[in-house]
Amino acid sequence: MSERPEHMTPKPSLGDEPGPESLPPRPDSQLGEPFPPHGLSYFRGEGRAPENDPNRETRLSRKPEPPPGLGPVLAWHRESPRGKAVLVLTGVGLMLAIVAGISLFSGDGLAAFGYWQMWVFVVIGTILTAGPFSYLTYAAGADWFMVERARWGVKKRLWVDLYELKKIDVSYGGTTFHLFLYDKDLGLSRSFEELQRDRRIWDLVYNGILHSVANGAQVSVQAIGILKLNETPALRLRDTARSSGDD
């Protein structure tokens, strides 16, 4: 396996006209080589190696199958039972903190915990925030990204073609940004926190974004800023292609 580059291709100087070769190459759909360099806008730091993270699944029996007709899975992430338990406990703690805050703010001390309605709120809030009865699996191949939800043994999937994206957007919701990706058929949205649980998934997704932007994908101003697209040749390649088309 070839050595993986550590940085993005250097940004060309203002006097240069970037060509397609200025982008990191697109990996082979079956072999996954060359694997993309690290994508920009990664917020999680280097983190631990996947095999050393007790909160993620490492059993190959839990590895998802690729979408029909597409290349193999190159990177995937699913919470382990321990990771799910940690998430549920975190959700419970968050709901309890909200109830306590409301009660203290109203001047009643912790009297709110004496009302059964508040415990219903805690239970429902935990289900909504932690999804204790479902597992989400994130997976990426050389040219696709997929989200698979498993609940009570029933699986549902959504995936996009990373190199055929038509629209890219970013919005702020909750405590993090959410990335919206639309290809020729459909779209999906996931938070940056979810997309970046495995650095390799993010690198594959980001490389597809760069090539899609260079090929003319619509990208919002906020997405340009959050994804740091101005630090890559992608926008200049798109604008050059549009100028040539106008001529």
Image (tube, rainbow, N blue to C red):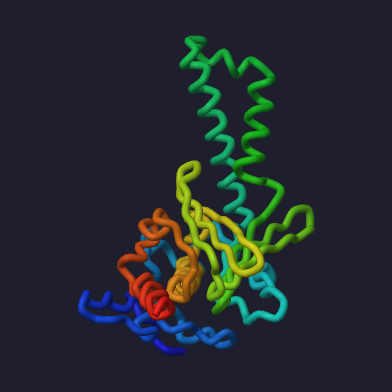
> In percent of the image, x 68 and y 20: which residue is there?
117
Front residue of 15/54: it is: 15
- Left or right placement of residue 90 versus residue 152 in this view: left
Q: Position of residue 4 (x, y in %)?
A: 39, 82
Q: Position of residue 48 (x, y in %)?
A: 43, 64
Residue sticking out furthest to the right: 153
Front residue of 221/43: it is: 221
What count of labels does the image hold?
0
Q: Position of residue 23 (x, y in %)?
A: 38, 80
- Left or right placement of residue 150 versus residue 174 in this view: right
Q: Is residue 81 in view from this perspective? A: yes
Residue sticking out furthest to the front: 247
Q: In what quadrant of the picture does the C terminus appear? A: bottom left
Image position of 228 with respect to 22: above or below: above
Q: Position of residue 203 (x, y in %)?
A: 45, 71
> In percent of the image, x 72 and y 57: which residue is there?
150
Front residue of 82/72: it is: 72
Front residue of 183/197: it is: 183
The image quarter containing residue 135 is bottom right
> In percent of the image, x 37 and y 70: which residue is there?
235
Q: Is residue 58 in view from this perspective? A: no
> In percent of the image, x 61 and y 61: which residue is there?
187
The image quarter containing residue 143 is bottom right
